[in-house]
Image: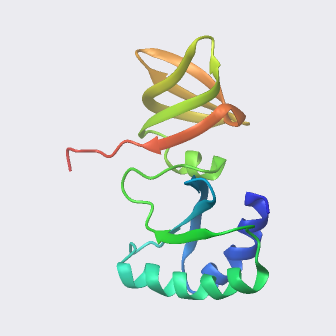
Amino acid sequence: MLKIDLLQLLTPAITALGYELWGIENLPQGRQSRLLRIYIDSPTGITLADCERVSYQISGLLEVEDPIPGPYILEVSSPGLDRLLFTLAHFERFVGHKLTIKLTPPLATRRNFTGILQRVEDHNLIILADDIEYNLRFEQIERARLVPDTHL
């Protein structure tokens, strides 16, 4: 099952519980297993009890629908302060914040950027890194993460 199908399957159940489905990671875990990590968020933050509640609810849904072939481990987590960014809406929400971005394929010969997200235009992110503005295509982003402000 594709990630988009997992989003479509899980979003209504998670939303009905009062949470936002922030993102999904479906990662290899050893040779024959996978780690299905579901990130949830809410305006008041996420507690361990929230993660347990969502895990219980979506475990049953995943068991009935069986969207993932083979064995997997389900983990429900808060996105945290250094949260991964999955969608263009996430990037738009964090304009002005510092990010780390890894590209595939690289831009010229550079894959890794750390800088301030200036703006989002169409499907491009404008990031200021090393005093240079870079125009990065959203489709090139392999992984993007917020850099927490340590001056709080």
Q: How many numbered dots are placed on residues in this image?
A: 0
Residue 27: % across, % down: 59, 54
Instruction: From this view, report whether residue 130 is shown above or below residue 48.
Output: above
Whole-percent x, y for residue 69 in the image:
75, 67
Residue in the picture at 50% in, 50% down: 84
Q: How is the image coloured?
A: rainbow
**The N terminus lies in quadrant:** bottom right
Of residues 102 and 59, the one nearer the viewer is 59
Q: Residue at x 53, y 82 (%)?
A: 54
Residue 48, located in which quarter of the rendered image?
bottom left
Left or right: 86 as drawn, with respect to 83 = right
In the figure, is residue 118 to the left or right of 48? right
Vertical comparison of 26 with 75: above or below: above
x then y, percent, for residue 138: 68, 36
Position of 110 relative to 46 (above/below) = above
Residue projecting furthest to the left: 151
Residue nearer the viewer, 116 or 46: 46
Residue at 79%, 65% in the rendered image: 5
The image quadrant that residue 36 belongs to is: bottom right
Picture coordinates of residue 94, whole percent (x, y): 49, 47
Image quadrant where residue 121 sits: top right
Residue extending furthest toward the front = 31
